[in-house]
Each structure stands twice: as structure tokens, then as C-alpha cells.
């Protein structure tokens, strides 16, 4: 059984007022229990302390107080011009400049009648100030019916300070019942700048941190593919660890889309499933749908399973419904199921996986192979008599509707003897890769059963030198780290082997120190090569790395005969150069270059600078070049104050070869004392030569809700370093 706090009337009012429209962000699933909170026995039995300029009556019956009256009992303090305290009933009746303080909250009014112990009474024409989030408001009357029940008549609420708040909420009648943890409001209207923007004849809500079923704020936006879109979510609180959100979405150009998202959370499992459908799309004349489901579960110690299932009705679904559960640029929808069992030193897994391909209308996408199934086993130990050993093995059935099919089994044991000493390390390693294929759909002459066994020997070694130095005037430790990595793998003809899941890896510093030039297990590169690298770091006294510089290159002593696309007779790889560091507290920079000495040009490069001098101030500048893929882009993004309370946000990803904007975002944010307005336009590529444009506008009422469409995810993903302007910054 889950318990929730029993709040005093003022805090119950706050819980209502901050949850009238329910939170705009998705509620959080919980599995932990909370403890009840109430008045302690010490507070309940506390004596009443009474003071005034004039007292009359009988101290054991009724006391009439006049002039600067103050009555204190437990957590409650009442001040007034005139009051009567009935001792037997523990009741205060007061008039004139009423001021009551209770659990940190403050009430003022013209007349009060209140039983201090029972928490029963009323205040006429009150105003209130709530300690939590500094909310305030007024009402015609507040009736405290019991410790756990209250009724507010013609009440208002706002987190804006001052007598004329920019936004406020008004409710004709509000019934609060903390015993049942339910509140009910009638004739509720939210006003912004004096204009009503949201209304409801009746609504219910939780009085504690527990979630409550009800309407979430509607979202409104527009896209170039659907026109005006209006979504009205409805939240269903099934249990503390289960919920359901229903979201009908009206798309002006297409019709009514229905969606649902269910979430669940347990001690051994968690998951989320989303479904959406649009019947008889007015533009395509077809039924459209998408499904996404993820789940993880622990069945026993060391045993778990999971799935990730996705499906869409047609190829154009991501681009036509950019705000749906499928990403606008997502073209491969994974469908995976995994079962894993293991311990500290070994693990085994069984996997079924394939993809739904949503074809690009211009550049066809080759469907990846299905794995039906894929069985893997890994094991390993470190420091066994000084040796490290690992074993990887796999048995996979590869299936494809058009390409050659078959089974592949391999085992790859490895053993290494690391020698680690202060200032240097040497790690010799020996591995053996043994594979066998059983091929379908091939002629007998080509062979159905193919085998390959390849040993690999490698040695990784390096030195570490240190010295004291300065970096931009600050004392640092500088390191100099030369590294050599030698690999030898004999040549084996692998041209008859199929290619199920293998491609040649792009050159990078991580790949320079890999024994195989390929990603996957269908090709094992022949190697007689040496990688040389030099790294220098600047390290602060705290141990943080302030800057890093690196250069590396691979040298080939023999021709590379195992390739995808023809043999290569190169004596060396491209030269890699990298530098990254924090120049100052506000400025960081990074650069990476892949330079071909044979072609005498830069094959790949990326440079980036970030300037972040303060909260909500960030400027990013990036340049990317990938000559093999004919890509050259300049990417600029920023969040910056434009004027008092005005902030600009933007991003431009400009393609230099095409002389056009590949991706863009532009908008502004306005920050008032108690509300924020955001207007953001975004252009996102969805396929070759196609893009989706969307317009977001959002009004955030601090402490109440967010109205409109949510651009925050787009801002965070498009502008590295973006900060919400109504939250304190993190140093």
C-alpha cells in the first residue's frame, strides 16, 4: 500500500493550484513508498499562548481580546484587532486585520472563525501567500471543514507577485479532501494578460505528489506536411508504477490521428509502448499507423530479456508525421528480441533481429540481413598468473529476401600478457579467428561449406613522460606519450566468403589501434603493419585534462590484399591529427584532420569552437568536411540575450557544395518574472532532397503548466550547451 503526505489546508490548496491543468511534462513513474505527514502529538497537545493590549472574560471559559491580538497554538498563529478565544472549544473568532500563519503559509482577511486543534473554520475575503514556490491569491471565502477537508469559494492563484499578476487562475468552487487525496474544482479559468486562455467546467486532481488522471494541457503547432496540428492528451493514472496517455491529434490536412502511450515500471522490469493511427488519410487515401515498444526484464539473477519492436505503415510515415513516435529522418526501424544469461566471467545470449526499411524516394536503401537467430557466447578473465584471456563466439543464421543466405559460426580466443610499469607498458597478444560458413542458394561449384582460420599477433607498447609547465599562465603537468602498435595477420583468400554484416571502418584514432580494418566478421584483414602515435596532455592539479594533442599514422610493410573493392598497395595510411582543450573557462575548441599524403589533400576534417561566457549564453561554430562522401558543412548554433528579457536561439547547418541550408532552427524566448514565451521554427531533413518544417510556440506559466507545442527537445538537440532560461545555471 502506498501512502502520501497529508498536507495542511494551505498546502493542499497549493497542490491543487499547481496541478490544475496537470504538469505539462510527462509524470514520473514511481515504485517507492512515501510516509504520511501530519501534526505531531507534541503540536496537538501544545498550550495556547494569548496576548493583547486588553483582555476580559474568564480564563477558563471565554477570553475577549482587544488591540494587537496574538494567539499561538502549535503551528498556528492568529493576529487580529479584536478576537474571542473560547478555551473549551479551542476556537478563535476574530475581526479586523486578520492575519493567520500556519505551516509557513500566511492568510489575511476581514473575519475569521477557527478551531485551532480540529482545523475547522473559515476566513472571509482572504488573501494568502504560500511558502512553497511563493504562490499567492485571494478568495471570497475559505472554509476549513476538518483537518483533511476544505472548500474555497471564488478563489484565485498565481506565482506572479504584485496586485495585478500577468497570469492567474480563478475557480468558482474548490473542494479539497486530503483524506481521499482528491480535489475537485468547478468553473476554472486561466487568465493571461487579462485574457482567458484555458477553461474547464469541472476537473479533479491529486492533493499530493501522486499522479491523477485528467486532461493535460493541449499542444498546438504547425508543419508543412500536415498544416495546423492540435493535440489534446488525456492522462490515465492506472497505478503508481503504470500509466497511460491518450492523445488524439487533429491534423488539418490529413484528419484525426489517435495515439496512446503506456508506461510501466517494476523492480525487475520496465517498458513503454506507443501506438498511433490515422484512418483514411485525406492526402494519401490510406490508413496510416506506427508502433513502438521497448521492454527490459530480469527473470532471475544473471538472466534477462528485452525487446525493441518498431513498425510503420508506409515509407513516407516519418516525413509525413514528423512529430510522431518515428523520428523524421529514421529509415531503418529495428525489431530486436534478446535473451541474455551470464555471470561475472561469461555471458551467453540469443537474439532475433531484423529491420523494416522505409525507403528513401531518391537514394534506395539496401536492406540489412535478418539474424534468425544469433547465438553468442563470451568469456574472459584478467590477471590469471599475469595473463588476460577472452573468448568470443557466435552462431548466426543470416536471411535476406534477395541476397545469398547462410549460416556463420566463428570462435575467436585471445590471450595477452600485459606488462605495466611506471612510465611504460608492453602488451603482447595472440588471437585465433576460426570461421565456418554453410551457404544457401549457391551453385555446387562455388561450394556450400567454407572455412577460414587466421591467427593474429600484436604488440601494443607505450611510454609516458611528465614535466611541470604552464598552460595560458596556469601551472600544469604536461605528458608526452609515444605509442607503437604492431599487428601481423597472414593473408588468406576470402573472396568466396559472403558479406553478411561487414564493412571497412573509417579511419580514426580508435581504429588505428585495432587489429582488423573491418567492422564485422566476414573479412579479416591481412596485416604486417605498425601504428605510431604521439599524444601530449596538459593536466591540472585536480587531475582534470585541460588540453590534448595527438598525431598518429599506420605504416604497411606488405600490400593489403584483403579488401572490399580491390587490393590496395599503400605504404602508409592517412595522417590523423587531433587537438582539443579548454582555452579558458568560457572557451573550448576541438579539431580533427585526416590528411592523405599521397593525394596531398584533406580527406576528412572537423573543427569546433564553443564560447559560453555565462548562463543562457552559448555560441557554437563547427566545420565538417568528408571528401569521400562529398560532404562539406558549416554549422552555427547559439543561444544569446538580445535585449532585456529577450533571448534568441538559432542553428544553421549550411551545405557548401549545394549552397543551401541543410538543417535550420530559428526562434526567440521571452522571460518575464513568472512566465516564459517561446516561438521556434525548425527545418529537418527527412529524405534525400526532402525536409519537414515545423513551428513551435509555447507559453510556460511558472509553477502551473506549459501550453502549446514543446520546442525544448529540439533546442537541446540543435544547440549544444542550451540552458532553460527559468532555471538556475549549473557551474
Image (spheres, grey):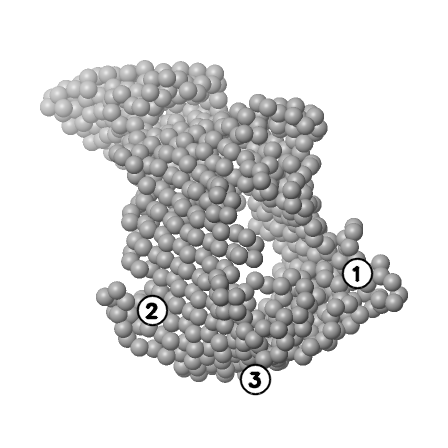
| Residue 194: x %, y % from top left | 34, 17
Q: Which of marks 1 and 3 is in front?
A: 1
Q: Which residue position is annotated with label 1?
A: 406
- Compute the Cα span from label 3 to label 2: 36 Å
Relative to residue 33, is residue 287 drawn left or right? right
Relative to residue 669, is residue 385 drawn left or right? right
- Compute the Cα span from label 1 to label 3: 41 Å
Q: State the SS at label 2.
A: strand
Q: In the image, which disc is placed on residue 270?
A: none
Q: Which residue position is annotated with label 3?
A: 385
| Residue 24: x %, y % from top left | 46, 32
Label located before the other in sequence (3 or 2): 3
Residue at image location 59% in from the left, 33% down from the top: 321
Residue at image location 70% in from the left, 53% down from the top: 368
Q: Is residue 308 visible?
A: yes
Q: State the SS at label 1.
A: strand
16, 52: nearer the viewer: 16
Residue at image location 58% in from the left, 40% down from the top: 689
55, 538: nearer the viewer: 538
Q: Do the residues labelled 1 and 2 touch (CB within 8 Å)?
A: no
Q: Is residue 86 visible?
A: no
| Residue 119: x %, y % from top left | 34, 26
**Above or below, comparing residue 621 to residue 462 in the picture:** above
Relative to residue 485, is residue 292 drawn left or right? right
User: Farthest residue in the right direction?
Assistant: 444
Q: Which residue position is annotated with label 2?
A: 538
| Residue 586: x %, y % from top left | 30, 53
User: Farthest residue in the front direction?
Assistant: 599
Label located before the other in sequence (1 or 2): 1
Amino acid at each position: 500500500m502506498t501512502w502520501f503526505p497529508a498536507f495542511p489546508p494551505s498546502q493542499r490548496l497549493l497542490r491543487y493550484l499547481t496541478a490544475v491543468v496537470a504538469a505539462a511534462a510527462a509524470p514520473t513513474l514511481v515504485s517507492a513508498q512515501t510516509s504520511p505527514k501530519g501534526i505531531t502529538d507534541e503540536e496537538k497537545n501544545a498550550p495556547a499562548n494569548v496576548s493583547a493590549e486588553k483582555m476580559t472574560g474568564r480564563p477558563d471559559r471565554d477570553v475577549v481580546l482587544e488591540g494587537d491580538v496574538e494567539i499561538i497554538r502549535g503551528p498556528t498563529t492568529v493576529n487580529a484587532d479584536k478576537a474571542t478565544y473560547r478555551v473549551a472549544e479551542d476556537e478563535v473568532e476574530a475581526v479586523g486585520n486578520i492575519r493567520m500563519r500556519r505551516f509557513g503559509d500566511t492568510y489575511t482577511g476581514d473575519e475569521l472563525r477557527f478551531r485551532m486543534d480540529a482545523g475547522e473554520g473559515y476566513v472571509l475575503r482572504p488573501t494568502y501567500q504560500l511558502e512553497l514556490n511563493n504562490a499567492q491569491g485571494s478568495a471570497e471565502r475559505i472554509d476549513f471543514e476538518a483537518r483533511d477537508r476544505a472548500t474555497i469559494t471564488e478563489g484565485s492563484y498565481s506565482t506572479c507577485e504584485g496586485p495585478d499578476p500577468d497570469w492567474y487562475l480563478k475557480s468558482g468552487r474548490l473542494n479539497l479532501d486530503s483524506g481521499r487525496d482528491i480535489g475537485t474544482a468547478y468553473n476554472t479559468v486561466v487568465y493571461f494578460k487579462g485574457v482567458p486562455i484555458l477553461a474547464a467546467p469541472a476537473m479533479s486532481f491529486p492533493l499530493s505528489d501522486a499522479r491523477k488522471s485528467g486532461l493535460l494541457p493541449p499542444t498546438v503547432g504547425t508543419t508543412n506536411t500536415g498544416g495546423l496540428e492540435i493535440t489534446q492528451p488525456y492522462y490515465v493514472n492506472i497505478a503508481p508504477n503504470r500509466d497511460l496517455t491518450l492523445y488524439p491529434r487533429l491534423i488539418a490536412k490529413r484528419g484525426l490521428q489517435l495515439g496512446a502511450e503506456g508506461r510501466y515500471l517494476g523492480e525487475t522490469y520496465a517498458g513503454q509502448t506507443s501506438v498511433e493511427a490515422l484512418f483514411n488519410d485525406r492526402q494519401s487515401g490510406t490508413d496510416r499507423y506506427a508502433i513502438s515498444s521497448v521492454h527490459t526484464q530480469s527473470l532471475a539473477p544473471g538472466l534477462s530479456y528485452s525487446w525493441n519492436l518498431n513498425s510503420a505503415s508506409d515509407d513516407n510515415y516519418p516525413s509525413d508525421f514528423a512529430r510522431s513516435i518515428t523520428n523524421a529522418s529514421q529509415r531503418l526501424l529495428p525489431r530486436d528480441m534478446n535473451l541474455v544469461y551470464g555471470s561475472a566471467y561469461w555471458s551467453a545470449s540469443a537474439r532475433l533481429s531484423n529491420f523494416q526499411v522505409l525507403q528513401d524516394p531518391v537514394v534506395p536503401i539496401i536492406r540489412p540481413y535478418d539474424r534468425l537467430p544469433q547465438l553468442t557466447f563470451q568469456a574472459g578473465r584478467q590477471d590469471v598468473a599475469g595473463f588476460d584471456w577472452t573468448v568470443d563466439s557466435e552462431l548466426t543464421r543470416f536471411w535476406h529476401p534477395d541476397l545469398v543466405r547462410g549460416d556463420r559460426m566463428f570462435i575467436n580466443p585471445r590471450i595477452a600478457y600485459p606488462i605495466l610499469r611506471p612510465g611504460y607498458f608492453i602488451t603482447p597478444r595472440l588471437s585465433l579467428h576460426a570461421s565456418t560458413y554453410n551457404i544457401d542458394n549457391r551453385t555446387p561449384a562455388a561450394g556450400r561449406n567454407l572455412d577460414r582460420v587466421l591467427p593474429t599477433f600484436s604488440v601494443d607498447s607505450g611510454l609516458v613522460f611528465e614535466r611541470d609547465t604552464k598552460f595560458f599562465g596556469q601551472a600544469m603537468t604536461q605528458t608526452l606519450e609515444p605509442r607503437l602498435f604492431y599487428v601481423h595477420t597472414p593473408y588468406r583468400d576470402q573472396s568466396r566468403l559472403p558479406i553478411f554484416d561487414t564493412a571497412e571502418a573509417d579511419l580514426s584514432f580508435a581504429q588505428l589501434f585495432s587489429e582488423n580494418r573491418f567492422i564485422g566478421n566476414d573479412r579479416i584483414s591481412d596485416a604486417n603493419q605498425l601504428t605510431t602515435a604521439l599524444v601530449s596532455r596538459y593536466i591540472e592539479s585536480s587531475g582534470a585534462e585541460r588540453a590534448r594533442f595527438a598525431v598518429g599514422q599506420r605504416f604497411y610493410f606488405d600490400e593489403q590484399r584483403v579488401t572490399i573493392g580491390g587490393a590496395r598497395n599503400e605504404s602508409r595510411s592517412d595522417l590523423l591529427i587531433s587537438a582539443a582543450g579548454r582555452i579558458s573557462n568560457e572557451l573550448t575548441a576541438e579539431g580533427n584532420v585526416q590528411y592523405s599524403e599521397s593525394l596531398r589533400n584533406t580527406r576528412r576534417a572537423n573543427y569546433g569552437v564553443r564560447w559560453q561566457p555565462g548562463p543562457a549564453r552559448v555560441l557554437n561554430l563547427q566545420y565538417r568536411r568528408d571528401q569521400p562522401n562529398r560532404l562539406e558543412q558549416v554549422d552555427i548554433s547559439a543561444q544569446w540575450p538580445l535585449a532585456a528579457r529577450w533571448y534568441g536561439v538559432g542553428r544553421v547547418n549550411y551545405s557548401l557544395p549545394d549552397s543551401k541550408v541543410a538543417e535550420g532552427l530559428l526562434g526567440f524566448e521571452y522571460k518575464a518574472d513568472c512566465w516564459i514565451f517561446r516561438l521556434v521554427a525548425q527545418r529537418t531533413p527527412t529524405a534525400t532532397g526532402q525536409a519537414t518544417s515545423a513551428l513551435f510556440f509555447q507559453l510556460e506559466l511558472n509553477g502551473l503548466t506549459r501550453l502549446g507545442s514543446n520546442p525544448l527537445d529540439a533546442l537541446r538537440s540543435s544547440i549544444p550547451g542550451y540552458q532553460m532560461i527559468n532555471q538556475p545555471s549549473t557551474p
